[in-house]
Image (cartoon, rainbow, N blue to C red):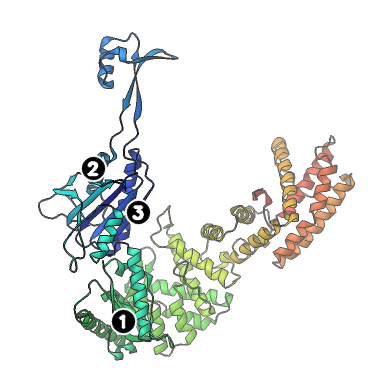
Amino acid sequence: MPDLLLELFCEEIPARMQARAADDLRKMITDRLVAAGLVYEGAKAFATPRRLALTVHGVPAQQPDVKEERKGPKVGAPEQAIAGFLRAAGLTSIDQAKVQADKKGDFYVAITEKKGRAAIAVLAEIVPEVVRAFPWPKSMRWGSGRLTWVRPLHSIVATFGPETEEPEIVRFSVDGIDAGDETRGHRFMAPGAIKVRRFEDYVAKLHDAKVVLDPARRAEMILADAKNLAFAQGFELVEDEGLLAEVSGLVEWPVVLMGSFDASFLAIPGEVIRATIRNNQKCFVLRDPQTAKLVNKFILVANIEASDHGKAIVAGNERVIRARLSDAKFFYETDLKTRLEDRLPKFEGIVFHEKLGTQGERIARIVALTGQLAPLVGADVAKAERAAQLCKADLLTEVVGEFPEVQGLMGRYYAEAQGEDEAVAHAIEDHYRPKGPDDLVPGDPVSIAVALADKIDTLVGFWAIDEKPTGSKDPYALRRAALGVIRIVLDNALRLRLLKVRGVSADLLSFFADRLKVQLREQGARHDLVDAVFALGERSAGGTTDTNNAQDDLLMIVRRVEALGKFLETDDGKNLLAGVKRATNILRIEEKKDKREYTGAPDAELLQQAEEKALAEAIAAAKKEASAAVAKEDFAAAMSAMAKLRPKVDAFFDKVTVNADDKAVRENRLKLLSEIREATRAVADFSKIEG
């Protein structure tokens, strides 16, 4: 089958837009192909700073023929209606139509066959549509044309044909630019025109013209060359995925070089050096593999093999980096002259949120909440409150103003410099953590207290003013804050009753529950087991279960889910589940029929058969043993206690007729079934479990 090669060649595309643009190009072209009946075998898109390219292989040479039916007027309809039908259907005589009968009578039907068009003709319509409608985040016009594109568009390559034949040019024009088979190589090293035929030929000729088409390949080259160059000098590259992706979008022919800066700048915190060099010059930093400290070297990626082996390029980068590091050093030294607590009064004039007051008021709330949480997590109250008081102070420093990504970290450096306790200094840095699913969780009690207070205050505040997340919208990152609280609690095995924390409401607790469900499911927990445990909280809200269910204790919920999952993997668990479900189903049917609930203890005097007496005794024993185990939070033991019910439940259903003729006996046996249901609710609501 034929293949399509498409290239849109233009001025430099911003690196941040390239990956999305390549994906958009692939999707827009292939969606239209499928809509046109041209189902392809595969497609892949690429981007460099100067071009978007797409290959689609296995495209049918022609659209399939289509048979269309058009229903017309009734047989015997007025001539005017029949004439209109003939015109619309493209027929010259009513004899060309067929007559079909339905419930309302006989109707004329025109059946026409539409011949499929050549795929190359369809592409000639599709590609211009895509180019004109391309969704660039920002685009521009140039010259006198009407086309908007990210940067001026210079040429279009569009060829189509099978491997065994010379491909044809897809003939179309966009704003005066005719599609052809000619592109250009590297802007400086191979700027001449290149004739291309199909994708393999295109990639090879571009490579010869100093262009690496695949961004993933460019990234691999940069990373390998940077590591090797660093290793050869006895250093180690500080890897940076985000920077690597950006730099690979800035060059078509990556050339890795090494530069240096004055060693005196190493007195600045390493993170500030890295941020300065990264943000301003898109360069990588290096470290000593023995000490893990930065060295006064950096890696840059040029887009040209210079005749002087890159000396002028390195020198230019060194000049800029020297100036930027001088600024950073000045900012850092200026910041050290003012103590963190002396910056706090300025927060009284900075609004955090119009409905939640100033940053100063927020800090006061965090301090108060930290004081409540510190004893609960085993933290020194005075140290925790001191850390909470200072945790936001670095937001007003020069360095954080220049590099917001080092907030918290710089607070730690400044706290250490002014002689604060180490736990206080680290809490200032760690209180933002975890910032995402892959970030570390605070482990020191002081850090835990401040991190929890910061996140819970955010949630409580925005819940109070009814600014909750809706759908995909979460402008204040409240889902992330809730997940942060959950991870801190679980990773540190904290026993924290959220409803006892100042400001946490039942509504906010439900939000935590939803986030916890999501996290547990992502970790592989069965959704029905999660629901079975959370269902206990729903019953607790109605006042029908004891306080041991504690659905505001996240750690206990997780342990219940884990224990339940392990129990149900055993034969005892599976069989008990089947028995409980049978009991629950019978109860549901009978309670619905009788319009009442069968609750309360069964009357021992009405227990007639040995099997129901044995079951009643087993339930009493299991409830007592399970309750004791739950009280000790030994959920595995509670499950074991429930497992002892299995043979008694099996024997009961085998020998006992629940719906006895005697109404009193029937009611008593239904209450016994209810006891089975209630006994298992010591650990979970088995009715929510599938299987």
Three-letter amino acid code at the position of disc 2: Ala
Q: Which residue is mark 1?
A: 298
Drawn side of residue 430 relative to residue 210, left or right? right
Q: Earlier in the sequence, mark 2 or mark 3?
A: 3
Q: Is residue 353 above or below residue 142?
A: below
Q: Which residue is mark 2?
A: 124
Q: Secondary structure at mark 3?
A: strand
Asked whether residue 269 is in view, the answer is: no
Q: CA distance from mark 2 to mark 1?
A: 48 Å
Query: Is 615 above or below relative to 317?
Result: above
Percent across and percent down for residue 124 are 23, 42
The crowding category of the residue bearing disc 1, from other C-alpha atoms within 10 Å (few below 14, some 14 to 19, many at least 20), is: many
Query: Which disc number belongs to residue 61?
Result: none
Q: Position of residue 17 (x, y in %)?
A: 29, 60
| Relative horizontal placement of residue 31, taking residue 451 as reference (left or right) | left
* 200 and 482: which is toward the camera: 200
Q: Secondary structure at mark 2?
A: helix
Residue 44 marker: 3
Q: Disc 2 to disc 3, how far (Cα)? A: 19 Å
